[in-house]
Amino acid sequence: MVIDHSVAQGAYRHGVFPDEHGRFGEFGGRYVPEGLMAALIELEQSYRTARDDAEFMSELDRLLCDRVGRPTLFHQAPRFAQLLAVPGAKIYLKREDMAHTGAHKINNALGQGLLAKRMGKTRIIAETGAGQHGVAVATVCSMLGLACVIYMGAEDMRRQVSNVVRMNLLGAEVRAVQTGGRRLKDAITEAVRDWVANLDTTYYLFGTATGPAPYPMIVRDFQTVIGAEARAQILKSEGRLPDYVMACVGSGSNAIGLFHSFAGDSGVELIGVEAAGRGMETGDHAATLSVGTPGEMDGGYSYLLQDSDGQIIRTHSIAAGLDYPGVGPELSYLKDTGRVTYRTATDAVALGGMRAMSHSEGIIVALESAHAVGYLMQMARHGELSADSVTVLSLSGRGDKDLAIAAQRLGIGG
């Protein structure tokens, strides 16, 4: 089937998304209590002013370089490419795992932290799933002298103990969320309640490209440094754009940060890999864009995993950062226009990807990123990866946080 991408490409070439209502096509918007509308409008106005302020952007660029370590590494993975057994195929890795704190989350946390300080806020709250966003926010608050409270589902805290320790050591107060499924969605709910009660002093530093407008735009903009760098780096390395650009997809900040800079290039195939968990047929997965339907959650309209009554379905993924029943509105828009192809990888495939990248390249990737690694291996195995092709694959984070899970599931360790 031939898909017409002209609508999406035109939109991206001319930078028209989101529109004045915070929508990407039909997705996005603000579905929040009246008490939050003024705060969101203030946030949008403050962000747009900051974005146009050369001094603010210069300070952000300086700190991304001096304190985060940008631009991040970009290099071929020749031994991993050999595993794929596709003649002439080249795999380039965009190494967000090498950014300070070990993941892409620091890009957005730093940008919003500077914005919060510009707005005169003295206290930061945030939600976290895998813990990497929480660590990044705690780090930024320590750097900028801001009080920090992190909400984290009790189940995610159990799975990501090392990141809880890191947040505490960095001076953050980590509050365990015991309601609902005790995961990311529930942490967001608790953080919003805190924000409503403390609007005057508190900035809600949202971690991913979902939620009510203007958060999807703000997070997207602060994460596009990933794709902008990767685009320049692949042109320098190969003298041309890649054939494939791949990233894991949970709620979406890593993926949209990479995809955005390539969305207007019709010759580049964009592939997002979601969590198939224990298998799509079991229902124990987090593949929102693959099988979800549009609806409202956490203040925005996007694809969700929900039942026929509109109730959110419980999700599962071995990767805490992918274990979320929603996704950002921009990625939903890119699904409906056909610009991004979404695929799935099971827990087992992700573990295989983690092991393969570790053995072939000496890189222990986060289980989130391992979904994309494992799916790329499946593409090659099934003859879906073209000979002499060039692929850019985002490694969104380090696997340190997942060592206990990997040891248990792979039967390794002391």
Image (cartoon, rainbow, N blue to C red):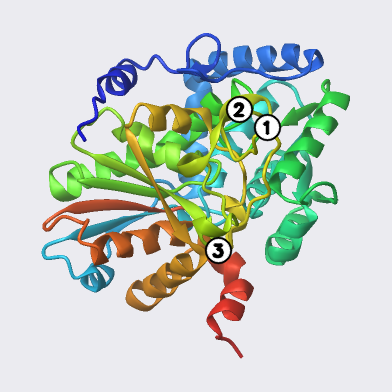
* Crowd around label 3: few <14 · some 14–19 · many ≥20 (10 Å): some
**CB under 8 Å between callouts 2 and 1?**
yes
In the rendered image, residue 167, in percent from the top left (x then y), is placed at 73, 55
| Residue on which disc 1 sits | 310
Asked whether, in this view, residue 336 is left or right of residue 140, the answer is: left
For label 1, the SS is: loop
* Crowd around label 2: few <14 · some 14–19 · many ≥20 (10 Å): some
Asked whether, in this view, residue 265 is left or right of residue 333, the answer is: left
- Judged by depth in the image, the label closer to the viewer, 2 or 1, is 1
Look at the image and tell me whether residue 397 can be seen.
no
Look at the image and tell me whether residue 31 can be seen.
yes
The residue type indicated by label 3 comes to Arg
| Residue on which disc 2 sits | 295
Lower position in the chain sequence, tag 2 or tag 1? 2
For label 3, the SS is: loop
| Residue on which disc 3 sits | 278
Q: Nearer the viewer, residue 216 or 179?
A: 179
